[in-house]
Image: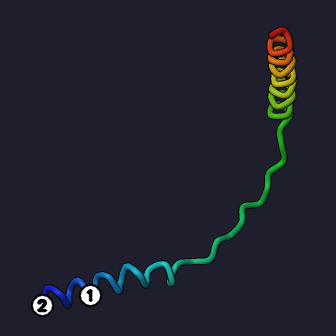
Amino acid sequence: MRHILSGIFCAAITALPAMAAGFDRPAPQAQSATAEFWFGLACIALVLALAAVHVLVRRR
């Protein structure tokens, strides 16, 4: 009896992904002006950080 129940349980678990619904891709949203501002600020900070690392490594 125990083996039958565990077999049914295993069959049910393996069959669940086959019955799953299809994946709907999310539609991309437009960027806000605030998001563009912070992205631009982050890009500038990254370039400045890379320049600082370049100067520090070049001096060695």
Q: Residue at x 81, y 25 (%)?
A: 46
16 vs 41, left or right, is left
8 vs 41, left or right, is left
Q: Quadrant of the N terminus?
A: bottom left
- Residue 36, position as x, y percentages in the image: 85, 33
Task: Give the quadrant of residue 32.
Answer: top right
Task: Give the quadrant of residue 52.
Answer: top right
Tell me if residue 32 comes above or below residue 28 in the rendering.
above
Tell me if residue 20 comes above or below residue 59 in the rendering.
below
Q: Residue at x 49, y 78 (%)?
A: 17
24 vs 29, left or right, is left
Q: Earlier in the sequence, mark 1 or mark 2?
A: 2
Along the viewing direction, whichever of 40 and 29 lies nearer the viewer = 40
- Residue 56, position as x, y percentages in the image: 80, 11
Q: Amino acid at mark 1?
A: Gly
Q: Which mark is residue 1?
A: 2
Q: Residue at x 84, y 47 (%)?
A: 30
Q: Which mark is residue 46?
A: none
Q: What is the number of callouts on the image?
A: 2
Helix, strand or loop at label 2? It is loop
Helix, strand or loop at label 1? It is helix
Question: How far apart are labels 1 and 2 at the CA level?
Answer: 10 Å
Residue wearing tag 1: 7
Q: Residue at x 23, y 83 (%)?
A: 6
Give the crowd class for mark 1: few <14, some 14-19, many >=20 residues within 10 Å: few
Q: Quadrant of the C terminus?
A: top right
Q: Amino acid at mark 2?
A: Met
- Residue 26, position as x, y percentages in the image: 72, 61
Along the viewing direction, whichever of 58 and 30 lies nearer the viewer = 58
